[in-house]
Image: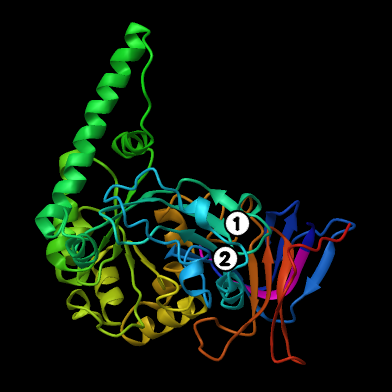
């Protein structure tokens, strides 16, 4: 798709705002951003008349399509809670592009989401990054796998404790993870020996995935809330040498200096929930600011559908109210989650070479009264807010003009 979005207040995020700027998109990619951009013949011009132009937001941790809305049990595919080690499982295989949450995402300016298995297992499975519009997961795909999801704390000990099986305690959860990585190390040694001897070798999908974590190919997304569980996550990462990303990090502010010193990123949230369990007793909108001021790289998450995904920007706004730097807040839903999840070569800012995912806002998106007016994914307009209808209209992905 070839379009030029002109006359906007362009906020590239990774760069200074440009008043009266233009974003030129050709073949679905951004090719120019600036004030004096030459527009080639045949390119559709979209004059936004002073509207704010930003990159599509990036949700770093959600369950779109695997925890479907309004479908109850039939649409719940987040947790395969029959095996504590689900490393071989792929969120990709459970995503329904027809989930209502994808339309909500677009209405909130979210164009990319990293979809993760749930937190019922010590090792939940492989995550995937998708665009929030399309007919099939393959058409929506940004990258797969992106990371491996793991969980510490209350959730896995409750799930398996109720089944009267390992793990039913925090030490049991850590042991399951530790045992799995040791088996993966042994598996790699046997595989390499068989290859050197030219002998056949029985493959194991679970251990192959964990081997990719050990080799640094995939980061480890660790669901953890309490400070002591976060320290357990650090301990396990030290033992096996993998790249750790803290997910949720509710009490990360209590050890913010430790996380900053070790350069461990935190995907914090959801921030609009009640304190529904012990692990959340220290949940506060102040916490993102504390982490950021300590030097922790920060992304904000809704954990959709725990918090509806179109409220992502509102969490950032209220975090600013409670002390988070405004620019950091904007980065926490754009370039930071993209970089943390290894997607910044595709999404997260407005710069040449990245995907043409652009959102036109009525004003500053951190102003709660602003709304997303038009959303472009890969240069295609997929969402428009209709004043006449008083609601957003999502383009039908099953209908394509010839």
Q: Residue at x 76, y 62 (%)?
A: 398
Q: Locate the C terminus by quadrant.
A: bottom right
Nearest to N terminus: mark 1 or mark 2: 2
Q: Is residue 156 magenta?
A: no
Magenta stretch, main secondary structure, is strand
> Marks 2 and 1: in contact by CB < 8 Å?
yes
Q: 396 or 287, which is in the foreground?
A: 396
Q: Quadrant of residue 375?
A: bottom right
Identify the secondary structure beneath mark 2.
loop
Q: 386 or 294, which is in the foreground?
A: 386
Q: Residue at x 33, y 7 (%)?
A: 197
Looking at the image, is 90 positioned above or below residue 268? Answer: above
Which range of residues does the magenta coloring cover?
4-14
Q: 268 or 393, which is in the foreground?
A: 393
Instruction: List the residue tagged with mark 1.
Output: 351
Q: 129 or 351, which is in the foreground?
A: 129
Measured Cα–Cα span from mark 1 to mark 2: 7 Å
């Amino acid at each position: 798709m070839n379009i030029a979005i002109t006359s906007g207040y362009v906020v590239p995020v990774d760069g200074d705002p440009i008043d009266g700027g233009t974003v030129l998109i050709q073949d679905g990619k951004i090719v120019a951003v600036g004030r004096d951009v030459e527009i080639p013949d045949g390119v559709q011009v979209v004059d936004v008349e002073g509207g704010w132009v930003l990159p599509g937001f990036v949700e770093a941790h959600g369950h779109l399509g695997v925890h479907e809305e309004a479908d109850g049990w039939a649409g719940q595919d987040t947790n395969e809670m029959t095996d504590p080690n689900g490393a071989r499982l792929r969120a990709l295989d459970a995503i329904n592009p027809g989930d209502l949450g994808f339309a909500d995402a677009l209405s909130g300016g979210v164009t990319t989401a990293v979809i993760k298995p749930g937190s019922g297992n010590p090792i939940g499975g492989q995550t995937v990054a998708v665009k929030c519009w399309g007919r099939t997961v393959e058409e929506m795909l940004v990258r797969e796998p992106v990371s491996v999801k793991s969980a510490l704390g209350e959730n896995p000990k409750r799930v398996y404790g109720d089944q009267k099986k390992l793990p039913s305690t925090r030490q049991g959860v850590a042991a399951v993870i530790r045992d799995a990585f040791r088996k993966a190390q042994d598996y790699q040694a046997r595989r390499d020996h068989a290859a050197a001897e030219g002998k056949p070798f029985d493959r194991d999908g679970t251990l192959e995935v964990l081997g990719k974590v050990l080799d640094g190919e995939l980061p480890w997304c660790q669901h953890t809330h309490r400070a002591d569980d976060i320290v357990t996550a650090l301990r396990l990462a030290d033992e096996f040498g993998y790249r750790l990303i803290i997910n949720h990090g509710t009490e990360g502010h209590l050890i913010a200096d430790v996380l900053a010193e070790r350069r461990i990123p935190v995907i914090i949230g959801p921030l609009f929930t009640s304190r529904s369990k012990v692990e959340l007793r220290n949940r506060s909108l102040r916490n993102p600011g504390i982490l950021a001021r300590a030097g922790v790289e920060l992304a904000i998450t809704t954990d959709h559908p725990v918090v509806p995904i179109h409220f992502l920007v509102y969490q950032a706004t209220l975090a600013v109210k409670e002390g988070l730097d405004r620019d950091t807040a904007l980065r926490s839903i754009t370039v930071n989650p993209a970089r943390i999840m290894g997607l910044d070569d595709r999404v997260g800012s407005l710069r040449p070479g990245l995907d043409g995912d652009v959102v036109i806002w009525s004003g500053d998106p951190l102003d709660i009264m602003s709304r997303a007016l038009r959303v472009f994914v890969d240069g295609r307009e997929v969402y428009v807010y209709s004043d006449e209808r008083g609601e957003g209209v999502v383009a039908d992905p099953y209908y394509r003009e010839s």
